[in-house]
């Protein structure tokens, strides 16, 4: 069964026609910064392009940052996308593309893809963490996705780790996302070097051994490791799957995260940390899989 997966991110919208975990066709757009209507326009545009080439696709899965109201098909707020507060995304998009749309948290969707087709397929219980513009997660307990009573389980990035620290998009200080996401690293780099700097540039300097950049990257890894250690003590998963754009840096960064996780898990059984196998395709594959099962 072919389905269409849409992955709404803070900087890009990815879309793909998928069958049994295989991508058959794809499109991509930048995420508008102009508000809700602009986001709907971009989603409809990318979906229409693919549906025009694949008219036999009947269902669309949409992975979005959350928290979400699944019953009403609404994004309650998406901190990294302007205008996405109490946003009726499902009804607005269905009206534009004349297809059923199934909404899922973006990190849940990516984790679901890894659970079905990727790095977590060998774990009985696992936690997926995506580290990119923001930080999100998905909790898989005994082959079940744990959404929680109000659909916000897995909002790993909004755990508060440093009261009084930098403010997050959800309005709280010292969250994991505010301390260790891609935007946080770029913010720290821009301050340390006195000029606008991207996350990629900070990592390039760190890999070249530059002291300030190394300190920024190491600090982000430390807070990510603390977050993982806390999750182990609450959920005790068999393993973690690390995905998102920053996972592509590889051992240089993931090794640091693992070092700090183990430091804060001294005396506890250490979980396995593995890199997501599906890369940045996990979001669209998972969203498409959600649509196929609905």
Image: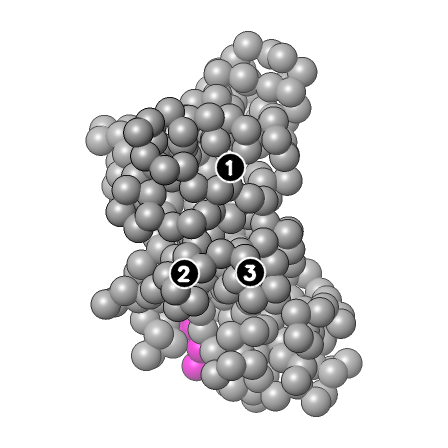
Q: Residue 225 lies in what quarter of the image?
A: top left
Q: Are discs 2 and 1 less than 8 Å apart at CB?
A: no
2 relative to 192 in the view: left or right: right
**Numbered label attached to residue 155:** none
> According to the image, label 3 marks what residue?
121
Answer yes or no: is residue 283 visible.
no
User: Which is more foreground, mark 1 or mark 3?
Assistant: 3
The stretch of residues the image draws in magenta is 88-93
Instruction: Name the spot of residue 223 as percent of width and height, x first.
Output: 38, 30
| Magenta span: chief secondary structure | helix
Instruction: Name the spot of residue 162 as percent of width and height, x first.
Output: 27, 30
Image: 162 above or below 43: above
Q: Are discs 3 and 2 less than 8 Å apart at CB?
A: no
Sort mark 2 into few (<14), some (14-19) or many (20+) by Cα contacts within 10 Å.
Answer: many
Answer yes or no: is residue 99 visible.
yes
> According to the image, label 1 marks what residue?
182
Q: How many marks?
A: 3
Instruction: Name the spot of residue 131 as percent of width and height, x first.
Output: 50, 43
Q: Secondary structure at mark 3?
A: loop
> According to the image, label 2 marks what residue?
140
Query: Tag 3 or tag 1, which sits nearer the N-term?
Result: 3
Image: 28 above or below 168: below
Q: Residue at x 75, y 70 (%)?
A: 25
User: Which is more foreground, mark 3 or mark 2?
Assistant: 3
Q: Secondary structure at mark 2?
A: strand
Residue 232 counted in the magenta span: no
Q: Residue at x 41, y 57 (%)?
A: 125
């Amino acid at each position: 069964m072919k389905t269409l997966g849409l992955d709404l991110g803070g900087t890009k919208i990815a879309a793909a026609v998928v069958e049994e975990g295989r991508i058959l066709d794809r499109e991509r757009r930048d995420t508008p910064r102009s508000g809700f209507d602009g986001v709907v326009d971009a989603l409809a545009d990318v979906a229409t392009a693919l549906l025009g080439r694949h008219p036999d696709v009947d269902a669309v899965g949409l992975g979005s940052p959350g928290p979400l109201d699944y019953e009403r098909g609404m994004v309650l707020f998406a901190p990294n996308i302007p205008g996405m507060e109490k946003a009726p995304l499902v009804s607005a998009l269905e009206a534009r593309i004349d297809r059923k749309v199934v909404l899922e948290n973006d990190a849940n969707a990516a984790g679901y893809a890894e659970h079905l087709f990727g790095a977590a397929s060998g774990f009985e219980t696992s936690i997926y963490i995506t580290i990119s513009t923001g930080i999100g997660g998905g909790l898989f307990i005994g082959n079940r996705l744990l959404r929680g009573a109000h659909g916000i389980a897995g909002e790993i990035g909004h755990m508060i780790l440093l009261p009084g620290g930098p403010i997050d998009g959800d309005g709280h200080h010292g969250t994991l996302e505010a301390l260790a996401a891609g935007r946080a690293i770029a913010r720290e780099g821009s301050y340390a070097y006195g000029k606008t700097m991207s996350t990629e540039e900070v990592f390039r300097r760190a890999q070249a051994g530059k002291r300030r950049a190394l300190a920024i990257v190491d600090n982000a890894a430390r807070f990510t490791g603390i977050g993982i250690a806390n999750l182990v003590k609450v959920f005790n998963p068999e393993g973690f799957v690390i995905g998102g754009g920053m996972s592509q840096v590889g051992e240089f960064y993931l090794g640091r995260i693992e070092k700090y996780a183990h430091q804060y898990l001294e005396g506890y059984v250490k979980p396995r940390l593995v890199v997501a196998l599906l890369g940045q395709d996990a979001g669209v594959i998972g969203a498409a899989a959600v649509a196929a099962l609905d």
